[in-house]
Each structure stands twice: as C-alpha cells, then as structure tokens.
Image: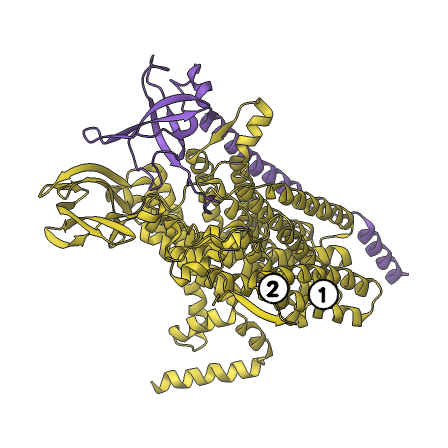
Chain colours: A yellow, B purple
Amino acid sequence: MDAHRVRSSSEGNETTVYFSDLGSIALILALGFALYTVVIAILGATRAQSQLVVSAKRSLLVVTILLLLASAALVASFLTHDFGVKYVAQTSSRAMPWYFTTAAFYGGQQGSLLYWALILSLFSAIFVLTSKRVPIALIPYIMATLMGIEAFFLIVLTSVSNPFVRSAVVPADGAGLNPLLMDPGMLIHPPMLLMGYVSFSVPFAFVVSAMITGKLNNEWLRAIRRWTLAAWTIQMTGLILGAWWAYHVLGWGGYWSWDPVENAALLPWLTATAFLHSTMVQERRGMLKAWNLFLPMASFALSIFGTFEVRSGVISSVHSFAYSDIGTYFLTFLTIVMVFSSILFLFRLPKVRPDQEFDSMISREGVFLLNNLLLVGMAFATLWGTLFPLISAFMRGQTMTVGTPFYNNVMAPLIVVLILAMGIGPLLAWRRTSPTALWRNLSMPMIIAAICAVILPLLGVIDIAANIGFTVCTFAASAMLYELWRGMRVRHAHGEPYAIALVMLFKRYRQRYGGYIVHLGFVLLVVGVIGSHYFQLQSAVVLNQGQDTQLAGYRLVYLGNIDTKEPDKETITAQLQIWHDGQLQGYIYPGRIIYRNYGNQPASLISITTFGATDLYVYLENWSGLSQADIRIFVNPLVPFVWYGALLMIIGGVFCWWPVGSEKLLRKSPARKMTQLTSHKVTYMLL
Amino acid sequence: MQPALTVSTERLQAARPRKRFPLSFLLAGIAILGAILYLVYANTQANAVYYMTVPELKHCTICVTQSVRVAGYVQANSIKRDDRTQSISFVIEDSHQTLPVVYSGVVPDIFRAGVQVVVEGHYSKGTVGRQPFQAQTLLAKCPSKFQSAST
C-alpha cells in the first residue's frame, strides 16, 4: 500500500526498508570508497604500482555509482511523497507537480549538498574515463584530490546535513516549496550554478597534481584549460540564468543587484576568466607559470567560499537560505584547502621558472597581463565589497556596508579599460609590435569609434560616461570584426569565397575565433548594461478605468482588472493597452498570483514587451476592486542586448570547448588542405 | 679554443638568475594596481553605509546627512499605502523598539507583516526619532527561507 517502502519478509517478521535507508547506506559506503581512493591512489603513485592506480580508478567509479544510487533514492523519496523523511517534508508537498517535486531535490541545504557531491563524482568519473591524454604521473594525484573533496562533502552529508534523516512522526503533507521558486527558472538556474561551483574542483585537482609532481607541460596545460573552459561556461550560464530569472519573474526590477550571493558566484568566474587568458601566455611563451598555478586555486577557494557564505549567513543577503552550523564545516574545509595549497605552492615556487622574458609592453602578452590585473582587481573589489560588513566590524567596531554605487563606480572604469584591451590585444603580435604595424591595425577601428563618439551626442545621447562606454564598445567590436575581415580577405586572396573563408577561419582557429565570439558577446552585454543603467525611465501611477498614462512615447490605457479564483490560488491582472507610434501595439496583463496554501504569498506576473531594443517593463504594484490599479512602468533601453550578448558568450564558450575540431585538424595533412582549397576554388568557379 | 669559450659564456648566462619582469612592466603593473586600490578605497569612503539596529538609530547623529541601513521585522497591521504620494508606510521592530518607515519604490513580493526587512535611507532634517525614517531602498528577506522552517 505504501509506494515508498520496499517490503521484505524474512522468517515471518516484516521489516520495512525505505528508499531513504538505501540512500543513507549508499552515502556511508561512498565515503568509505572515497577515502580508499585517496589512500590507494597516493600509494600507487608514490610506490609506482600501476595496479593500485587501476584499483583507485575503479573505486572512484564505485563512488560515482553509489552517489547516483543515493540521489535516485532521494528522488524516489520525493516522488513517492515519503514525508517521513524530514527533508522531503520540508521542501515538497502533495500539491506540487512532479517536476517541482523532483527539483525540490536541491531546494534545501541537505539536497543541494548531495547534488554537489553527485556532480563532483560525475565530473571525477568523466575525468577518469577521458584521461588518456593527461600525463600518466598526474592521474593518481588528481583522483586523490577530487576524492578528498568528495570525502569532505560525504562527511557533512553523513553527519550534520543528512538528507535522509527520518522523523518519528510522519506528517500527512509536506510544507511545500516557496511559490517564488515554483518557476521554470528553478528547474535550471540553481543546478547550473551549483554545477559551476563544483566544476572548479577539477582544475584545482590538476594544479595540486602539478605542484606535487612538478610536471606542468603543455599536455597538462591543454587539459586544465579545457576543464576550466567547461567550468567557466557552466558558471557563466548559471549566472546568466539567474539574471534572466530575476528580471523576468522575481520582480526585482533589474537583472543584477550586487547582492553578496550574486557576488560569490561571480568571483570564481572572474579568476577563471583571468586564467583562460594567462594560460595562452604560458602556452606560447612559457611564462606566468606560477601565476597559472595560483588562479585555479583561487577559483576553487572562492567557490568553496561562496558555498560557505551562502550557507553560513555571516553576510546578510536577499537570498536568505536556511542557516545552520554547517558554515563552520565549510570554513574549516576552506582553511584546510588554503593552507594545504599555499604550502604546496611555496614548496613548488622556487622550481617554477619562466622559459622566456617579457620584451615589450606593446605585445600580446603585455595586454594579457593587463587583462589579468584588471580581472583579478575586479575580483578583489567584489570580494572587498562583499566582505566589507565583516572588515568594518573588525577594523572600526561598526558594521558598515557598501551597496550598488560602490560596485558600479569601481567596476565601470575597470570594464572600460578591459574592453579597450579586448580591442587592442588581438591586433598585437607576441613579443613586440612596431608602432607602424599597430597603427595599421588600429586606425580603422579608431576611426569608426571616433565617428560613433561624434554621432552619439547628435542623436541625443549626452551622458558623458555612457558615451565613453559606447565609444569604447564600438572600438572593440569594430577591431574584432576588422580582424575577422582581414583574415577572410587573406583566405579569399588564396582563392576561397568569403563565406567559406569565414567558416574555415572558425574551424581552423577554434580557440581564437571562439574567443572573439565571447568578446563580441561581452561587448554587446556591456552595451545593454550601459543602456539600461543610464537611460532607464520609470514612473508610478494610479489609474482608474479608462485613464491612460504616457512614458517615453509609450501610452498605456487601463481597461480594468481581471480576477480569477482557483482552489489553490487567486490571480489578479490589470488589463492595459499599449499604444506606440499612434498604433495599438497589443494588450498586456501585469498582475499577481496569490497562493492560498502558502500564507497568501503573492508572486508577480511581470509584463515585458520588447520594442526593437527597448523593453517596456510593467509591474502591478497594487489594486483596488476591479477598476483601479497602481502600476509601475519601466522603460529599459537595450536590455535585450544583455541577453543576446550573454547568449553569444555561452555559444563562444561552448565553441572553444567543443571537442571535435582540434584533434581532427591536427591529423589533416597540409597536402589535404591544399586539395581542399583547390576543390573549393573549383566549386566556386563552377558556380 | 674558440668553441669551448662560447659554451662557457652560455653556461654563465644560464646560471645567472633571470629577471622576471623588466622595470617598465613592474612600474606599469604597480600603477595599475595602485589605481585599482585607489578606486576601491575612494569608493568605499564615499559609499559605505552604517548598518544599525533600531535602538542604535534612536541616538543617531549622522542619520540626517548620511544614509544608514536598518534591519527589523515588519510589525503586524502597520503597512499602509498612500495612493496620493505613491508610497507605503510601515513600522519595523527590533529588540522591542520600533521605527516608523516611509518608502516609495518597488515593493518586493515577499514584503508583508512579519518578514525581516532591511531599509536604507535617512531622516529628514531635525526629525531624528520624531518623523518616519525615509527609506530609499527596501530589501525583504524570505520569511520561510528558501526552505521552509515549519518543522
């Protein structure tokens, strides 16, 4: 009769086994196997016994299977509504649809830690199964590091934060998930962001292994770069989904508010971005080796810090999670990680020597250095702002905070310089660039930027800061497009049609042109941010039936409220007409949903209508009866650019990461390429 | 003779400690780092806001010229809307002391009686402790947390 238990009778006595019992056992076994992997992998490496390493690999895969089992047990507990499990009772209810019930898996602390452990074990398994090209001496240490981290999470999961703990009294129904979280955003944003945090473990493990063995060759660099690229892309996707969710659903008005929890997620991403750039210097010139060991350690430490900050409640945030003593565990773990990696780092530092020296500041590596300083500076400023309540309490004995203006004022100039570097960098040669060559490459983008700087005020954009921003963005975008154009022209001169030349450039130089896609996306995103930051308009009005209001050429005519009552919720929407350019553009229905079984908590229905590159963002603030509404209107220019830019950045990241190209192309002989070129030429001529 | 000599100078060069960064790089790096640190320092000075409790605010001397942040729980039945001025007023409570607040702006969905809020703003001149606190921002915390604490 109970779906959530497996009955087994032995000698007439009925013992009841719950899915949660299976989960508990799987977690304990996983902890055992994880610890075994750590020990046996290190033994295998130090005694050079390959059968021990093979055993470590197998036991690592067993950890993965056990965590899959534990996760399946938790999902089964949720889907069978086994409210005897405390965690299930706290985060789900019978009324929830199955997909939100499943998503409640990571809706609370215990489950999200299990999710962390699961994803880490999956990444570890993927590493083990694809480690053919990783230097063999590194593999045991990478496995040991990954399983060491895994063991920490499993210790927490089996002691203070066990999702499978049962209560003595089984409630009839669970408390359910906050209605604000019952949104498709909940299905993708938290798991993506958590996965991003987890994924910084792999580059960290690579760094630890390189520091222990002293082997940081190009194979190592390529492998760690690919893993970092994956982590970077995942984390960025999580961040963007969060911004999208906040803007479209939560009614916070904006897409980014420099909240401590958002900052925590941004930090490892910034240091990983720095790493992706500085590895290129190491790859080409054999420099910045020590720095490249430091950055992944920083990213990992920051991702653990993020988890700690979110969970401990030391810093107040709008994202209030359930606080618990788990923060202490994370702080301890963070300390261990930092002490351990600092000792390794200091031990290895004297032996890490650059192969070459820096020649000139006006060189590719010079700009990469600038880029790294800026990105790490941005990370520092963000961390400083986030921790400022603690810093000020410690230094002055008085808690102080810094808000959005602090971040905006610090970040804006840094981003302007970063985008300038983004435009100039790809045009510079490695080692040194002559001023004439530089001018030849830069003159065209600079002229275009100058034209933009002149035209913008004529078009009515008179804000100086915004104009500088737009001009710099134009410069960087045109520099990149000009570079692309020159590449196409060179190939065209060798007989390729332009379209094929474009495709070939992207296929042949994945990293480079993938990087350009990311850069273009970032420029577009910044244009969107500038637009919505400097040119946002808002108004708040109370409208009676038939009245209208106007803002920036948009006229809203209020027709009345619509009230829909359903058993579990009541939906109130205001009906409005949008008039623009003298024409009726459509009807919008901003409103509220009031969930009865959740303390009458309202959730906003925001109406966003996009006209070209401008969002008309309408929010129902209050209402009275069916014929009066209190509405707030935002005109958000260029916000769609934020999303287009973000999408381009993700596409660029995936494009750089995508495995196919590089290996295949390496195998292609120059002769074959030549014949391909000629065949294209033939096709072209035939056409 | 000649070849042996070349080898030895090469060895000498290899043995000499390398310069990591040329001076120009070092200076530029220091300048950029200095600029970043200055940006952070100056903006901290300009934008830092005191985080006070309701009792502390009662004796506040700087709360007219500077913004401060205050946290507290919204008192039951204290939320009133003023349609004329498009603002809401409410009372927050902390450590058995209360603070009336006026705010106009986007009200978060989760704002209601009983939730913990953080308001940022200041007093109008000469009204410390008598007139309501003028809030420019209103942040509300989810009362049930992301995970319900009903058990």
Say if labels 1 and 2 share a chain. yes
Nearer the observer: mark 1 or 2; the answer is 2
Residue A85 position in % (x across, y down): 53, 55
Q: Are marks 1 and 2 in contact (CB under 8 Å)?
A: no
Q: Which residue is mark 1?
A: A139
Q: Residues within 10 Å of mark 1 (few under 14, many from 20)?
A: many
Looking at the rendered structure, the kind of residue marked 1 is: Ile
A573 to A117, vertically: above or below: above
Q: Is residue A355 visible?
A: no
Looking at the rendered structure, the kind of residue marked 2 is: Leu
Q: Which residue is mark 2?
A: A22
The subunit carrying tag 2 is A
C-alpha distance separating marks 1 and 2: 31 Å
- Numbered disc total: 2
The subunit carrying tag 1 is A
Question: Residue A94 occupies which quadrant of the picture?
Answer: bottom left
**Extreme right residue here?**
B1
Task: Point out the image quarter for the C terminus of chain A.
Answer: bottom left
**Extreme top residue here?**
B126
- Image check: A285 left or right of B135? right
Which residue corresponds to the image point at 40% horizontal and 47% vertical from the top-left? A472
Residue A488 position in % (x across, y down): 43, 69
Residue A250 position in % (x across, y down): 35, 47
**Extreme front residue here?**
A12
Q: Is residue A176 visible?
A: yes
B49 to A97, vertically: above or below: above
Nearer to the camera, B120 or A431 = B120
Residue A634 position in % (x across, y down): 26, 43
